[in-house]
């Protein structure tokens, strides 16, 4: 970027391949880089879950690709740890916020780029390095860590005596996560600054698309949460490599060995630090999906978002409450019942803004002229999954129930639906919607609908039965539980889930085909605004030029969701359209 | 947004819309698309404040851990405070004064005085870091190592974390001194102001950590 004393935010498009596509400072290229990283990570994470489901369905079966023919419990735990880590950090944190947010936040607020383009590039490449470091854990002596994505000490802090992956693999995991914290902090800082200071003329906070509101609140959550996780990672690393005892209590006996070189530490201290980050992380994953869903429901119902201000309030409320409820992940840690009560009440309070959002989504749809295209179907799917996954959260928010359910499959069902699959549906919705703007072609609707319906039915087939497994007492994080007779009876259900998972994963290949086929040979867009949407990204050429608005700063005159305005000829009023240019229904302009 | 929709019906049908400047947003200066405004200087201040907020969260996590860990177990032993820390503290406080004066000199166009004082500040920062390393060596000589007990562990971790952030501040000072500012989006005065805010913050942060390490032993 060329800069000059007190001059404009001038850009000249780079010409070299490296500057244009690799170390690019263009927010759009960086957004696509993040999406590619997330796409790779999602397929890697799904591959790991496929192996896990294979073993859970048929524990005794032997497969050539496992050493010795059968998966060991340690191998299962390593797959589980890396599946969770890669999915949470490299997919759910990366794609909705850093991917779509990077690409569309500056355009939707009328900016030429992020506030700090070089920092933006740096945050992507730091994320890439953290992924490489984490994936390296598969290839070191002992393999990947087995401590789960929450990496609870003391087992995560004691090294190789705990298990094969807890040596170099766990160290790489912690280092990778610490690097990821740095990347996320840089990204969050850039997002917030851009949104506060680079909005175009007329783009008041009350006119911002809800997508921007969710990216904004998500960035604030990231800014405040990742510093805490970084501190925790440093302390855990020191416990492992420097002999300190922040998290390791005394008198431990591990693998018949008495641990004498540590004493006095508190494993619960890690849990507090981790979950102070970890709960906001849930909203980091889901909030951008809420923004996309709100945006699309309005666009494809041809109606304004119902209760825009209430939606903004709910987004902020969810963000704030997200910092007050970390204790509900620790009900079974032996915490005081008074603390548990407080965390329980606060957790259930999140139901209020969540219900506001759901009510307003339905209110937006009510009486609308709904178009059921792929983007809209995935947005509706998001609402469905959010409600299903959210309802089980109300059960888990109660300590008395959580004591029984916490370590079982009920929780696996809950967080996969609300945090994993709902967020991924938000990503799919965004992709089908923005693909024409990003690449100048439509994704194939026919294949897309097959992809939607099979995925929608598939994820429910995978995760709904897990509620029953949990209620029946099937614990999670075990490679097999077939020894006890009461769990043997559940084995057919496990097999059903596994088959459903294989089909659902297979269906994603249809998506992958559609993505690449549409990229190369999809129907070309013939207009800048094929969806007749209102926000600024649809006012610029397709694909957007290097500096988005050609060096011109747009002026915003309207709210983000002015659909079906009485008296107007068209059923949408773009945000940038001057009032005197808005055509009235009698054919005149004012 | 239903409210806005109603407004716009009025705009379409009435005279109100003609020539009406758009409501506030950004700077709100003008009502037609035009060449892009200069990059706002305030963005740098926003970013700095956000960066400081993230640093506060990091150190609050550390400080909370310190307080929680001290209240647990029976292995906490008070770590003696090496006397050199008081000297280091004085050095850092003086550097906050010199950076403030340096900035005023730059604003009044006294470039030579600015440069001298800027270098004095940088030197004092380095002296502080050297003093912290001496404090570590004194503690180590007294048998208090990183893993000796949780109190000494926190002493090393907190001082190292602060030292790393201050080292970043020293790089910032070098950057302000050496960068060719004529080609930048902001002036050297603005950069010096940003650096001095960060520097004062590091100063305040150190006073907080020192209070924690001495009063909270």
Image (cartoon, coloured by chain):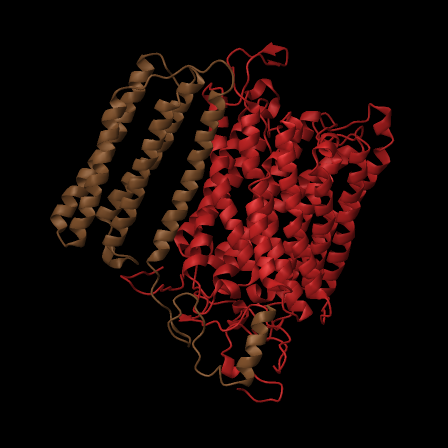
Chain colours: A red, B brown
Residue A351 in picture, x, y percent from top left: 67, 48
Q: Is residue A582 visible?
A: no
For image coordinates 85% across by 33% down, the residue present is A490
Seen in the picture, residue A206 relative to B52 is either above or below; the reply is below
Quadrant containing the N terminus of chain B is bottom right
Q: Quadrant of residue B5?
A: bottom right
In this picture, residue A515 sits left or right of residue B26: right
- Front-most of residues B193 and A474: B193
In this picture, residue B61 sits left or right of residue A344: left
How many numbered discs sit on the rendered protein? 0
- Front-most of residues A329 and A342: A342
For image coordinates 44% across by 36% down, the residue present is B58
Q: Quadrant of residue B131?
A: top left
Seen in the picture, residue A583 relative to A282 is either above or below; the reply is below
For image coordinates 57% across by 40% down, the residue present is A324
Q: Is residue A2 visible?
A: yes
Seen in the picture, residue A96 relative to A246 is either above or below; the reply is below
Residue B29 in picture, x, y percent from top left: 37, 71
- Front-most of residues A38 and B123: B123
Quadrant containing the C terminus of chain B is top left
Residue A256 in picture, x, y percent from top left: 63, 11
Residue A283 in picture, x, y percent from top left: 59, 46
């Amino acid at each position: 970027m060329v800069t000059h004393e007190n001059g404009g935010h001038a850009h000249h498009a780079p010409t070299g391949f490296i500057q244009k596509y690799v170390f690019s400072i263009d927010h759009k290229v960086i957004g696509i880089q993040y999406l590619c990283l997330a796409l790779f990570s999602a397929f890697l994470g799904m591959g790991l879950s496929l192996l896990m489901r294979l073993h859970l369905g048929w524990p005794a079966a032997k497969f050539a690709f496992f050493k010795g023919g059968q998966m060991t419990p340690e191998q299962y735990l390593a797959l589980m740890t890396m599946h969770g880590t890669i999915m949470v950090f490299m997919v759910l944190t990366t794609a909705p916020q850093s991917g779509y947010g990077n690409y569309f936040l500056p355009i939707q607020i009328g900016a030429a780029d992020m506030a700090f383009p070089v920092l933006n590039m740096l945050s992507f490449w730091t994320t890439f390095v953290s992924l490489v470091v984490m994936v390296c854990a598969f290839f070191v002596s002992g393999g990947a860590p087995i401590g789960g994505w929450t990496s609870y000490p003391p087992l995560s802090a004691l090294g190789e005596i705990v298990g094969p992956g807890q040596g170099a693999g766990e160290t790489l995991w912690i280092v990778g996560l610490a690097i990821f914290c740095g990347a996320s902090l840089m990204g969050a800082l850039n997002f917030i600054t851009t949104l506060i200071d680079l909005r175009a003329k007329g783009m008041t906070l009350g006119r911002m698309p809800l997508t921007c509101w969710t990216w904004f609140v998500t960035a604030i959550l990231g800014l405040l949460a990742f510093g805490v996780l970084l501190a925790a990672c440093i302390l855990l690393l020191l416990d492992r490599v420097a002999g300190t005892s922040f998290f390791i209590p005394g008198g431990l006996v591990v693998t018949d060995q008495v641990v004498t070189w540590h004493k006095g530490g508190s494993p619960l201290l890690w849990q507090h630090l981790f979950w102070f980050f970890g709960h906001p992380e849930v909203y980091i994953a889901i909030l951008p999906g809420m923004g996309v869903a709100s945006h699309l429901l309005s666009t494809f119902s041809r109606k304004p978002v119902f209760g825009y201000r209430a939606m903004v309030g709910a987004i902020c409320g969810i963000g704030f409450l997200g910092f007050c409820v970390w204790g509900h992940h620790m009900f079974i840690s032996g915490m005081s019942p008074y603390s548990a009560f407080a965390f329980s009440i606060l957790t259930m309070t999140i139901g209020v803004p969540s219900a506001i959002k759901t009510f307003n989504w339905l209110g937006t749809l009510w009486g609308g002229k709904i178009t059921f295209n792929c983007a809209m179907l995935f947005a509706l799917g998001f609402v469905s999954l959010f409600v299903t996954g959210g309802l089980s959260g109300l059960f888990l928010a109660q300590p008395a129930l959580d004591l029984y359910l916490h370590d079982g499959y009920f929780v696996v069902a809950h967080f996969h639906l609300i945090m994993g699959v709902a967020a991924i549906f938000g990503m799919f919705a965004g992709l089908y919607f923005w693909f024409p703007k990003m690449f100048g072609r439509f994704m194939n609707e026919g294949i897309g609908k097959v992809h939607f319906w099979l995925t929608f039915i598939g994820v429910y087939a995978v995760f709904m039965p897990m509620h029953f497994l949990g209620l029946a007492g099937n614990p999670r994080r075990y490679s097999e539980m077939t020894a006890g007779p009461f769990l043997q009876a559940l084995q057919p259900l496990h097999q059903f889930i596994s088959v459903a998972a294989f089909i659902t994963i297979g269906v994603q290949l249809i998506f992958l085909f559609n993505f690449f086929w549409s990229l190369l040979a999809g129907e070309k867009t013939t207009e800048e605004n094929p969806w007749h949407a209102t926000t600024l990204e649809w006012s610029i050429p397709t694909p957007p030029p290097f500096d988005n608005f050609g060096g011109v700063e747009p002026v915003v005159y309207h709210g983000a969701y002015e659909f079906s305005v009485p008296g107007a000829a068209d059923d949408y009023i773009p945000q940038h359209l001057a009032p005197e240019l808005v055509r009235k229904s009698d054919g005149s302009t004012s | 947004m239903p409210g806005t929709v109603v407004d716009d019906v009025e705009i379409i049908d009435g005279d109100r819309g003609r020539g009406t400047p758009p409501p506030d947003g950004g700077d709100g200066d003008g009502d037609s698309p035009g060449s892009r405004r200069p990059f706002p200087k305030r963005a740098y201040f926003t970013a700095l404040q956000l960066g400081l907020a993230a640093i506060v969260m990091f150190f609050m996590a550390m400080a909370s851990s310190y307080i929680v860990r001290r209240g647990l177990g029976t292995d906490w032993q008070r770590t003696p405070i090496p006397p050199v820390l008081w000297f280091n503290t004085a050095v850092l406080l003086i550097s906050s004064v010199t950076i403030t004066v340096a900035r005023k000199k730059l604003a009044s166009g006294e470039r030579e005085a600015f440069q001298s004082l800027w270098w004095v500040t940088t030197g004092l920062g380095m002296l502080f870091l050297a003093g912290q390393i001496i404090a570590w060596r004194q503690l180590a000589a007294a048998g208090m190592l990183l893993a000796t007990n949780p109190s000494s562990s926190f002493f090393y971790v907190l001082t190292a974390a602060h030292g790393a952030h201050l080292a970043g501040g020293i790089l910032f000072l070098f950057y302000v001194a050496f960068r060719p500012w004529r080609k930048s989006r902001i002036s050297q005065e603005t950069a010096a102001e940003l650096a001095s805010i960060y520097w004062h913050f590091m100063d305040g942060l150190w006073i907080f950590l020192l209070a924690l390490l001495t009063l909270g032993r």
